[in-house]
Image (spheres, grey):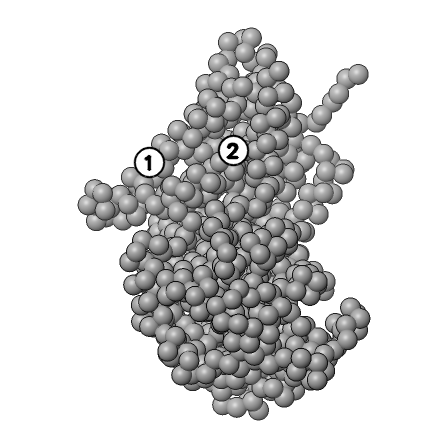
Amino acid sequence: MGFFLETLIGGLMAGMLYSLVALGFVLIFKASGVFNFAQGAMVLFAALAMARFSAWIPEWLGIDSRFLANTVAFLVSAALMFVVAWLIERLVLRYLVNQEGATLLMATLGIAYVLEGVGTSIFGSDIYKIDVGMPKDPVMILEGTFEGGLLINKEDLVAALVAAILVGLLALFFQKTTTGRALRAVADDHQAAQSIGIPLNRIWVIVWCVAGVVALVAGVIWGSKLGVQFSLVTVALRGLPVVILGGLTSIPGAIIGGLIIGVGEKLSEVYLGPMIGGGIEIWFAYQLALLFLLFRPQGLFGEKIIDRV
Amino acid sequence: MKLHKLLLTALFGAVALSLPLTAPPALAQAKEQFFPVLVYRTGAYATNGSQWANGYVDYLKLVNAKGGINGVKISFEECETAYATDRGVECYERLKGKNGGGTVFQPLSTGITFALTEKAPVDKIPLITAGYGRSESQNGAIFTWNFPLLGTYWVGADVAIQHIAKKEGGVVKLKGKKIALVYHDSPYGKEPIPILQELGKTYGFDVQLLPVAHPGVEQKATWLQIRQQKPDYVLLWGWGVMNSTALREAQATGYPRDRMMGIWWAGAEPDVKDVAEGAKGYSALTLQHGAEPNSKVVKDVLELVYAKGQGTGPKDEVGQVLYMRGLLSAMLGVEGVRKAQERYGKGKVMTGEQVRWGLENLNLDQKTLDAMGFAGVMRPVQTSCLDHMGSSWVRVHTWNGSKWEFTSDWYQADEKVIRPIVMLASSKYADEKKIKARTPEECKK
């Protein structure tokens, strides 16, 4: 029982991080109808910026405090992500208003290549460290109840909490603010939104900026866990089954989907894996997503697609 | 019209991106020995691949700086594989006939090696896979173009068990022990399984297999299983980010690092430097060498290549573990050419077939190695027509929190264990592919 609970808790905490990555997809899709394949590259770019600035800034400004250096590096990286968002709107999206979804998707593939190439050219392709003071050692709880206690990874716990706070803030932003409503209106119909005076270009810059900040937070968390390196782009692939399961247009869907995928893949690897050779957690998540695509293509919380003919 | 333009641009972009990235070729002139260089400087394994590639290319530059191979200068061209088998094969096809023909290929990928093993005999170009590739290919009677020089994964697995047995106080103490193999779920990661299972049966220990999917950034479930099953030792058969992630997860689940041992591809600076203190006590096998910043050959590289502004990578990485692996790999190829020249004419450009003879007759004794600047870095290698591995010397080094330190004496793989499995697996391959084994008489030709 103790081991089952450990796996469950581990899955929930991993799932919270998947939700954070999936949020990046959902935000941009909700506001612009674009399935952003560059999300992984944005996570890598943001993490590289954070890692390098947190090393360079103490040298440039003579700062001794790690907290201060990390704060300045975070702000500079966020500003850089704003610039990236503005450039994406100026150079790519502006010319693709009202184009087919597939065209926009291809454009984001191009953005991904550019961000990966430019990011590693500017910041280098070595493994870099982000040290934001995340605890690395585990903690044992309920040692009296379960033999050997329950092991909780403190780093995962902190990461899941940060992700939960960010997810909550974004949900509020979308549901309760005027800009959030404008973003949802743009997602529904570009032309209709423009006709009632919503400035499409500005809205797109805003949403890519928000997605950039989400990528930065995801990059800091994953970069702190894994080290900042090219493999971070694959982290975005963990968000794909989540959005398919939760629905591309739903923030609660991203959260619940993330948790289901996180728990599902860990339990399947631990209990089902040994029977069929192991190493199944990644494809298990995609199999689950495939099942949802067959029976509920809009996902758990996505808007139902009704075509009138 | 706009859309038309956009599509055209996208099409050209896609074509450009899908082509393997090739570095500008070093101009091939007459009397130059052409070395195609398969590398991965991009993708999930770029950090490790770049260091190997820098060492490889720097050594070729060093040979040229010293006048070439008996006066024959080396030309080379890189081709980016991104550690993908399809791109590796494409690179091979592009470079095999270039500049008079490739001398040797060294793909630095077991997956690509599997794919090229059937192509090399057709094109008559040797395949050097120092420390990786197909373990049974050490049998030169059947794998006539493969050269897993210095060691194979079966050598690694055998030595890892020898080392564990030594720590425990003898092989009898292995009975009843549990040894987990955390491996990259790819041809590379699966290579040691037959030997470990065989040794498990012989010595009475239990082998637990825990595959990790590419690229290895998600290992939580794996380490939860380790926490539950409590193996006595964990063998790590990872590459790239998988290694550092395993060490972080070991720390996060409280598994002692001094009970973990990696293969030589899981024992370099990029695997541990970010984990730093968290990886303290972790050991890995070495393919003879470790980090060798004070060796003569490294000093030569710094003096004759870097001091002239011709270094390939960052100067502070020269002499690190994977840099040395690349450098040694290049040296083995160069020495194959040098040996071939002894038979087919000094100062001449050698063909792939002639270089194969050179590689089958390598005899790098300690005196020669010391003179070349490899004193303390490696031990003698002697190949033959039937033995394409040449040596199986291995040491263990341990991460002390800031650098690797040798912590064992030299080991050699137990031939009594390895040989029967090599013969069995290579015969099976020969039957499948309908290959007739070379006889000792044929070898004399």
Identify the residue at image location x=65%, y=28%: A102
Where B427 sits versus B222, above or below? below
Identify the residue at image location x=58%, y=27%: B9
Residue position marked by numbered label 2 in the rendering = A111
What crowding class fits label 2: few (fewer than 14 Cα within 10 Å), some (14-19), or many (20 or more)?
many
Where B1 sits versus A235, above or below? above
Q: Which is more foreground, mark 1 or mark 2? A: 2
State the image coordinates of residue A113 (x, y, percent, origin top left).
52, 38
Question: Camera-side residue: A295 or B345?
Answer: B345
Secondary structure at numbered mark 1: helix
Mark 1 → mark 2, Cα distance in angstroms: 23 Å
User: Do discs 1 and 2 belong to a common subunit?
Assistant: yes
Location of residue A76 by image quarter = top left
Examine the rendering and report whether any part of residue A152 can be seen.
Answer: no
Tell me the chain of label 2. Answer: A
Where B5 sits versus B429, above or below? above
Residue position marked by numbered label 1 in the rendering = A75
Relative placement, left or right, of B170 versus A242 is left
Q: Which mark is residue B137?
A: none
Location of residue B414 by image quarter = bottom right
Relative placement, left or right, of A17 versus B272 is right
